[in-house]
Amino acid sequence: MEVTEIRQPPINVPRALYDELRMVALVSGVEVDEHVARALRAYLDDGGREAAVTGFAERARRRHRDALDLLAEPSRSGI
């Protein structure tokens, strides 16, 4: 049996955002959960995943800059 949906714990959003989301759900006839899923999909499709990975890599580069510089220049590291 293949799992097609995952139940995730509730997310916290500002009250004003939730009120807007409820209004959109009411007038569109589409459930709040579906709007949230669509918004997440659009975010990921529009580069959210790439931005997160790029940010992670940049933080790692800053954190480990000295070691990376040594690896880039073996003559300095004695390797």
Image (spheres, rainbow, N blue to C red):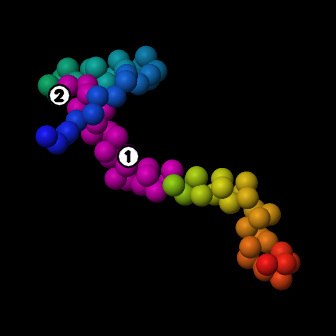
Given residues 32 and 76, the one toward you in this image is: 76
Indicate the amino acid at tag 1.
Tyr
Residue contact between numbered discs 1 and 2, judged by CB atoms under 8 Å: no
> Dividing the image into 4 quarters, which one contains the N terminus?
top left
Q: Mark 2, residues whose alpha carbon is within 10 Å: few (<14), some, or many (≥20)?
A: few
- Residue 43 is tagged as 1
Q: Secondary structure at mark 2?
A: loop
Image coordinates of residue 45 in percent, x first then y, are 34, 53
**What amino acid is labelled 2 in the image?**
Val
Residue 37 drawn in magenta: yes
Residue at 66% x, 55% y: name it. 60
- Residue 64 appearing in the image: yes
In the rendered view, tell whether residue 54 sits above or below residue 7: below
Residue on which disc 2 sits: 30
Where residue 75 sits in the image (x, y, percent)? 83, 83
Q: On the image, which quarter does residue 65 sit in? A: bottom right
Q: Which residues are magenta?
A: 31-52
Work out whether mark 1 precedes mark 2 in sequence or the reverse, and give the earlier one.
2
Disc number placed over residue 63 in the picture, else none = none
Task: Residue at 46%, 56% (x, y): give it.
Answer: 50
Q: CA distance from mark 1 to mark 2?
A: 19 Å
> What kind of element bears circle 1?
helix
Residue 51 inside the magenta-drawn segment: yes
Q: Quick check: can you spot residue 35? A: no
Which residue occupies the foreground of this view, 4 or 30? 4
Q: Is residue 46 positioned above or below 7 on the image?
A: below
Q: What x and y, as percent, mark residue 30? A: 17, 28
